[in-house]
């Protein structure tokens, strides 16, 4: 696999930070800089039906090179980077034959990428790491994914002896602000299923994510002079307090892991008259998720019957667990698992404690598990990616294409 490093660097040095306050798609004009480059490169390497729409969504086809029918599969990655940290003037550093010790990121030596703190680094001793210079994020999330898909398509074009069905490629803007999937034209994409290349550590394969909702509660009080308030004052700050105290104290992000759900109330603003509390609800299990929403309703109902109508609750669903859409087509996970094993990677299958573009796409009719792209410490200056992990992810894509064609040839006979 040639040029993976150079290709990756050519992408991360283009600033594509997205902006949640923008109403346009893409949310920032600068995302076009990389989008146009990617569309050009797809055409130059010989991909067919290369399109880039008015919202910068890019699609392309690698045509089938077999006679038998094979489902169309897709590979998807996003080219924006998070608004949480600067992506301007990214200056990647290459650490060859990593010795397993501390890596000084900046000239002053204030930013240290250390295995004492980031234990995952120990996995990559002897490999080539790509890091930041401590002043920006790297953008491996998700330009590693873009690099891998590009490199895999180029490889398949150059190696027609590897047999595969029709493959679709999709690159999206604005994933980091939760809008990567919303203008994705699933019908135009026309794949039977797809994979997002947007996971972290080598081996990751994910098809379960949270069910997610946001909750906000407004408490209304009555302000009276404290000296003469007996029997008259209603303090909305105390209503909010009573509400928060009624929540299960161990079901919070800092005390849960794996498939354990939680309530996370993260903002409170108010005074005697008005208090507003904001939070999120997360659970992998659909019934438990609904149960959590019902618990909020019950606590609010109880407060309202105790004090008179003092609280209003608003719950908004955000996204759902893709497991429901992927389990009926579990072979799409099996193929990815087989592909990893075939090239010597141990699959790490675990539920995501969050969501992906793939969860939305799965509910839009495109089942879409998530595969590792190789990077670590996303969204900040300690982000890094081992070159070897990007090479392996590229090989996984090639192998998935090959195994899918193979599987359906065998089924026909
Ligand atoms: Zn990402």
Image (spheres, rainbow, N blue to C red):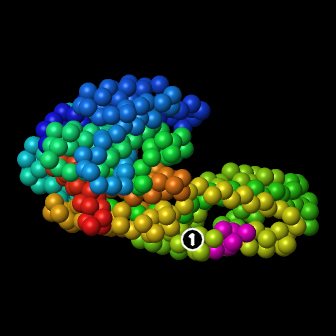
Is residue 296 found inside the magenta-colored segment of the image? yes
Q: Position of residue 24 (x, y in %)?
A: 56, 30
Q: Is residue 133 above or below residue 234?
A: above
Q: Residues within 10 Å of mark 1 (few under 14, many from 20)?
A: some
- Tell me if 186 is positioned left or right of 10 in this view: right
- Please tell me which residue is depicted at 11% across the width and 55% down the height of the picture: 125
- Tell me if 40 is positioned left or right of 359 in this view: left
Numbered range of the magenta stretch: 291-297
Q: Is residue 29 above or below residue 223?
A: above
Q: Position of residue 320 (x, y in %)?
A: 54, 61
- Tell me if 224 is positioned left or right of 4 in this view: right
Q: Is residue 130 above or below residue 123?
A: above
Mark 1 — residue?
Answer: 286
Q: Position of residue 68 (x, y in %)?
A: 29, 55
- Please tell me which residue is depicted at 57% across the width and 71% down the height of the picture: 286
Is any part of residue 336 visible from this angle?
Answer: no
Q: Main secondary structure of the magenta part?
A: helix
């Amino acid at each position: 696999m040639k040029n993976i490093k150079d290709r990756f660097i050519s992408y991360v040095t283009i600033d594509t930070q997205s902006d949640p306050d923008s109403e346009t798609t893409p949310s920032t004009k600068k995302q076009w800089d990389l989008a146009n480059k990617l569309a050009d490169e797809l055409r130059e390497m010989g991909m067919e039906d290369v399109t880039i729409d008015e919202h910068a969504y890019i699609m392309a086809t690698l045509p089938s090179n077999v006679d038998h029918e094979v489902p169309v599969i897709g590979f998807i990655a996003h080219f924006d980077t998070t608004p949480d940290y600067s992506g301007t003037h990214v200056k990647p550093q290459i650490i060859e034959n990593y010795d397993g010790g501390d890596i000084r990121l900046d000239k002053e030596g204030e930013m240290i990428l250390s295995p004492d703190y980031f234990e995952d680094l120990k996995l990559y001793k002897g490999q080539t790491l790509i890091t930041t210079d401590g002043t920006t994020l790297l953008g491996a999330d998700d330009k590693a994914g873009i690099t891998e898909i590009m490199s895999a398509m180029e490889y398949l074009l150059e190696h027609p002896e590897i047999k595969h069905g029709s493959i679709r490629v999709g690159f999206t803007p604005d994933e980091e602000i939760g809008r990567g999937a919303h203008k994705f034209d699933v019908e135009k994409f026309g794949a039977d299923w797809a994979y997002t290349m947007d996971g972290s550590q080598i081996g990751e394969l994910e098809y379960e994510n949270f069910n997610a909702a946001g909750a906000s509660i407004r408490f209304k009080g009555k302000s009276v002079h404290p000296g003469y308030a007996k029997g008259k004052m209603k303090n909305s700050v105390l209503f909010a307090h009573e509400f928060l105290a009624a929540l299960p104290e161990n079901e919070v992000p800092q005390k849960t892991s794996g498939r354990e759900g939680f309530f996370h109330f993260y903002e409170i603003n108010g005074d005697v008259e008005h208090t507003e509390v904001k939070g999120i609800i997360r659970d992998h299990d659909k019934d438990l998720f609904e149960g959590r929403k019902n618990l909020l309703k019950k606590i609010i109902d109880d407060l309202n019957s105790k004090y008179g109508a003092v609280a209003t609750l608003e719950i908004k669903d955000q996204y759902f667990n893709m497991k429901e859409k992927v389990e009926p087509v579990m072979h799409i996970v099996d193929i990815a698992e087989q592909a990893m094993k075939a090239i010597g990677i141990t699959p790490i299958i675990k539920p995501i404690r969050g969501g992906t573009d793939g969860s939305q796409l799965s509910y839009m009719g495109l089942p879409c598990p998530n595969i590792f792209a190789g990077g670590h410490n996303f969204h900040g200056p300690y982000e890094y990616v081992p070159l070897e992990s990007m090479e392996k992810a590229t090989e996984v894509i090639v192998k998935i294409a090959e195994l899918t064609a193979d599987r359906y040839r065998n089924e026909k006979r």
